[in-house]
C-alpha cells in the first residue's frame, strides 16, 4: 500500500488522544496529602502525575514493561567516515543484544523485562535466531546523494514499530521502553534535529559514540552541506514537509521507533525514551500527532548537543544526567527503577488521614465536584476501563481466567482413581491457607486422608446420615433424593478434612466482637480458595457435609474444641458439567440475579 499524499498518510497513523488532565490534578492532590512535606518528591511528582494522566488513573502502576530495540544501517555511514565504528558493527551488536551480553540486555534481564530486538534494516543478514527480521531494505541510501528512503519504505518501517507495539499490548504490556542500534545514526539524527529545531548544524552535531576531532569536523561539514541544500529546495512547514524530511535524512530504526511511540500512545501506554535517537524520533512523530508529547518520559539527557533542546521542545524533564552515550535504550532502562519507585510511593504511602497523623498542610483531596462520601467523577476516557482510579495488576487474560474458574467451579461426585500429583495437592492446600480470615486468626487446619480404611469409615457415617436425611422429605422427593450421589469418599483418591478452631487467637479476636461466627466464615473462604484452585488445576472437588461432627472427630482424632467443617473429596473427573449438579437433575435453579441485589436497604431493587 502506497501513501504518496500526506492526507492519506496521516489518515492511517494511530490516533493519539489527549491525556486526562483532570486525573493529573487528582494525583497531585493525593501527593499533597501523603505523609511527607509538600513537593518533597521533586521531579518525581510531575512524573507520577504524567503517568496518572496517561493512564487516566489517579494511582497509576506500570507492571508489564516491554523493551523494544530496532536495528538498521545508514547509507551515510557506509559511504562516509562519520563514526569511529565500521558499518558491520550494527549486525555484530544486534547479535550481542540478542545473546543477552550487551549493556541494555544485562539491564533488562536485571529488571525481568522481556527484550525484543527487530532488524528493520541491517545491511547484513543477522545471524541470531532471536532477532526478529522485518527488514525494509539493507540499510538506507546515502542521504548526501539523495533521499535516504522513499515514501513506501518510510511507511513500511513505521508499520514495523506499530506492529511490535500491537503484539506487546496483546501480551499485557503497559509501558514501552525504546532502544536502537545503527552505526552512523547520530548523523541522521543531527540532520533531522537541525531542521526540526531550526538550529545551526554546529549546535546539534556531537561526537556520537566518540569520534575524533577530525571526523567530527568532517561530519559537521557533510551534514551542514546537505541541510543547507535541503532548505534551498524544500518547505518543511508544508503539510507534507515533515514526512519528506524523514524520507531525506531518516533511518529505518528511527521511523520504527516513531511508529512504536504512536501506537503505544494510541493505547494510553507511556513511552520511556533513551537518548538523542529516540528523542529525534519522538520530536518528528509529535509533528504528525501533537498529543503524543504528553505520553513521553525522558529516561536521561545525553551529552549530545541537540538532546537538551529536543527534550525542551518535547516538554520532557530527563530523570537522569549521567553523560550516558551507550545507546541501545540503556538510559531508558537506567531510569526504570526510579519510575517504579515513584509509583510505589504514590500507591503505598499513607495519607495523613489514613495514618491518623495531623495534616500540617491543611490540604484536602479534591473530589471533582463530589463530597467526601460521594465518588469522584473524572474523564471517561474510553470504554476499556481507563477511568478507574487505580491501575489493574492483572492482564485481561488473567482476569478472564479468574472469572472462568469462578463460573466453571462445580461440586464433583464422580472421580477417576488416578493419584493426584503431590505438587498439585500442595498448591491447592496453599491456596486454602492463603484464604482471608477475620483478625488474621486463620482458624483452619487440613487433614489429608488417603488411607482407604479411614475413608471407608467416613463413608459409612456419611451414608447413615444420608439415609436419615431422606426421612425429612415426602415420599416422592425422598426416593428422588436417595438416588442422588452426594459423595465420592471411596472413589476419590484423596479427601481433605478442613477443620475450624473457633478458639484460635484467644477470647478477643480483632473484628469478631459482635459476630462470633466469623471464624467459620473465614474457614469457608479457605475452602472456596481450594475449590477455585482445584478447578484451575483441572481437579474435581466435592464438599461432603452430611455427617455428625462427633463421628468425624472420633475417626480422625480431632480435639473437642475443633469442628470438622468440611470433607473435601478431590480427584480427576471425566467431565465438568456445564451447570451445577442439582440444577442439572432438576433439584433447583439459580435465583434471578436482579432479585437478590438491593439498593441501600432491604427490598429496594437496584437499577443499573
Image: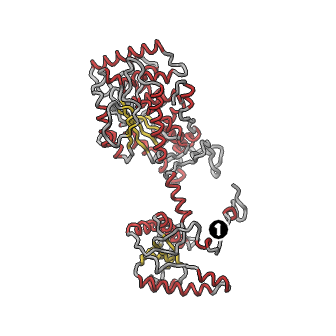
Q: Position of residue 104 (x, y in %)?
A: 34, 39
- Where residue 350 appears, as percent x and y from the top left, is 50, 51
Q: 245 and 560: which one is in front?
A: 245
Q: Position of residue 542 (x, y in %)?
A: 51, 74
Residue located 67% across and 86% down the image = 475
- Seen at 51% across and 58% down, the residue is 401
Q: Does the rendering let one see residue 331?
A: no
Tell me: residue 43, above or below residue 307: below
Q: What element does badge 1 sit on?
A: loop
Q: Where on the picture, by quarter, is residue 181?
A: top left
Q: Which residue is mark 1?
A: 590
Quarter that holds the C terminus: bottom right
In the rendering, at what x and y percent does residue 18 appear?
A: 57, 35
Residue farthest to the top, as pictured:
232
Please name whichever residue, 242 or 207, is drawn nearer the observer in this view of the structure: 242
Looking at the image, is 16 positioned above or below residue 508? above
> Which residue is located at x 46 percent, y 12 percent?
232
Amino acid at each position: 500500500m502506497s501513501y504518496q499524499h500526506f492526507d492519506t498518510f496521516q489518515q492511517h497513523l494511530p490516533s493519539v488522544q489527549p491525556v486526562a488532565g483532570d486525573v493529573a490534578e487528582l494525583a497531585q492532590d493525593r501527593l499533597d496529602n501523603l505523609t511527607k512535606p509538600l513537593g518533597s518528591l521533586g521531579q518525581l511528582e510531575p512524573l507520577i502525575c504524567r503517568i496518572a494522566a496517561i493512564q487516566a488513573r489517579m494511582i497509576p502502576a506500570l507492571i508489564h514493561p516491554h523493551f523494544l530495540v530496532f536495528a538498521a544501517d545508514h547509507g551515510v555511514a557506509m559511504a562516509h567516515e562519520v563514526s569511529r565504528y565500521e558499518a558491520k558493527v550494527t549486525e555484530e551488536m544486534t547479535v550481542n543484544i540478542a545473546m543477552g551480553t550487551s549493556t541494555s540486555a544485562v539491564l533488562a534481564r536485571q529488571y525481568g523485562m522481556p527484550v525484543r530486538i527487530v532488524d528493520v534494516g541491517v545491511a547484513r543478514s543477522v545471524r541470531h535466531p532471536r532477532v526478529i527480521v522485518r527488514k525494509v531494505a539493507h540499510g538506507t541510501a546515502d542521504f548526501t546523494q539523495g533521499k535516504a528512503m522513499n515514501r513506501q519504505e518510510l511507511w513500511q518501517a513505521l508499520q514495523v514499530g506499530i506492529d511490535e507495539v500491537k503484539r506487546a499490548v496483546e501480551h499485557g504490556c503497559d509501558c514501552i521502553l525504546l532502544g536502537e542500534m545503527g552505526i552512523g545514526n547520530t548523523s541522521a539524527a543531527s540532520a533531522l534535529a537541525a531542521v526540526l529545531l531550526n538550529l545551526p548544524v554546529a549546535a546539534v552535531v556531537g561526537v556520537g559514540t566518540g569520534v575524533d576531532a577530525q571526523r567530527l569536523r568532517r561530519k559537521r561539514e557533510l551534514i551542514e552541506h546537505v541541510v543547507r541544500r535541503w532548505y534551498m529546495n524544500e518547505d518543511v512547514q508544508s503539510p507534507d514537509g515533515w514526512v519528506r524530511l524523514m524520507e531525506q535524512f531518516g533511518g529505518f530504526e528511527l521511523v520504527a521507533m516513531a511508529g512504536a511511540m504512536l501506537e503505544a500512545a494510541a493505547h494510553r501506554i507511556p513511552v520511556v525514551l533513551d537518548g538523542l535517537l529516540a528523542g529525534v524520533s519522538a520530536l518528528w512523530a509529535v509533528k504528525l500527532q501533537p498529543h503524543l508529547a504528553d505520553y513521553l518520559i525522558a529516561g536521561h539527557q545525553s551529552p549530545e548537543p541537540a538532546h537538551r533542546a529536543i527534550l525542551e521542545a518535547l516538554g520532557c524533564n530527563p530523570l537522569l544526567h549521567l553523560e550516558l552515550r551507550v545507546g541501545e535504550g540503556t538510559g531508558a532502562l537506567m531510569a526504570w527503577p526510579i519510575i517504579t519507585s515513584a509509583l510505589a510511593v504514590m500507591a503505598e504511602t499513607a495519607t495523613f488521614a489514613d495514618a491518623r497523623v495531623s495534616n500540617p498542610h491543611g490540604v484536602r483531596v479534591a473530589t471533582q465536584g463530589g463530597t467526601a462520601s460521594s465518588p469522584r467523577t473524572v474523564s471517561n476516557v474510553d470504554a476499556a476501563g481507563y477511568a478507574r482510579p487505580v491501575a489493574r495488576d492483572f492482564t485481561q487474560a488473567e482476569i478472564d481466567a479468574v472469572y472462568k474458574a469462578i463460573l466453571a467451579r462445580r461440586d464433583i461426585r464422580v472421580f477417576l482413581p488416578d493419584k493426584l500429583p503431590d505438587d498439585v495437592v500442595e498448591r491447592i492446600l496453599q491456596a486454602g491457607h492463603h484464604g482471608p480470615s477475620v483478625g488474621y486468626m486463620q482458624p483452619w487446619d487440613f487433614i489429608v486422608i488417603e488411607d482407604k480404611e479411614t475413608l471407608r469409615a467416613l463413608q459409612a457415617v456419611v451414608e447413615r446420615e444420608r439415609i436419615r436425611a431422606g426421612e425429612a422429605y415426602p415420599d416422592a422427593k425422598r426416593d428422588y433424593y436417595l438416588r442422588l450421589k452426594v459423595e465420592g469418599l471411596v472413589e476419590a483418591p484423596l479427601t481433605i478434612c478442613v477443620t475450624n478452631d473457633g478458639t484460635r487467637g484467644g477470647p478477643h479476636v480483632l473484628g469478631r466482637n459482635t459476630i462470633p461466627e466469623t471464624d467459620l466464615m473465614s474457614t469457608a473462604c479457605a475452602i472456596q480458595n481450594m475449590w477455585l484452585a482445584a478447578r484451575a488445576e483441572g481437579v474435581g472437588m466435592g464438599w461432603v457435609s452430611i455427617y455428625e461432627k462427633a463421628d468425624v472427630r472420633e475417626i480422625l482424632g480431632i480435639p473437642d474444641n475443633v469442628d470438622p467443617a468440611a470433607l473435601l473429596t478431590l480427584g480427576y473427573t471425566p467431565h465438568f458439567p456445564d451447570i451445577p449438579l442439582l440444577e442439572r437433575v432438576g433439584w433447583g435453579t439459580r435465583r434471578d440475579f436482579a432479585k437478590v441485589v438491593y439498593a441501600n436497604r432491604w427490598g429496594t431493587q437496584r437499577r443499573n
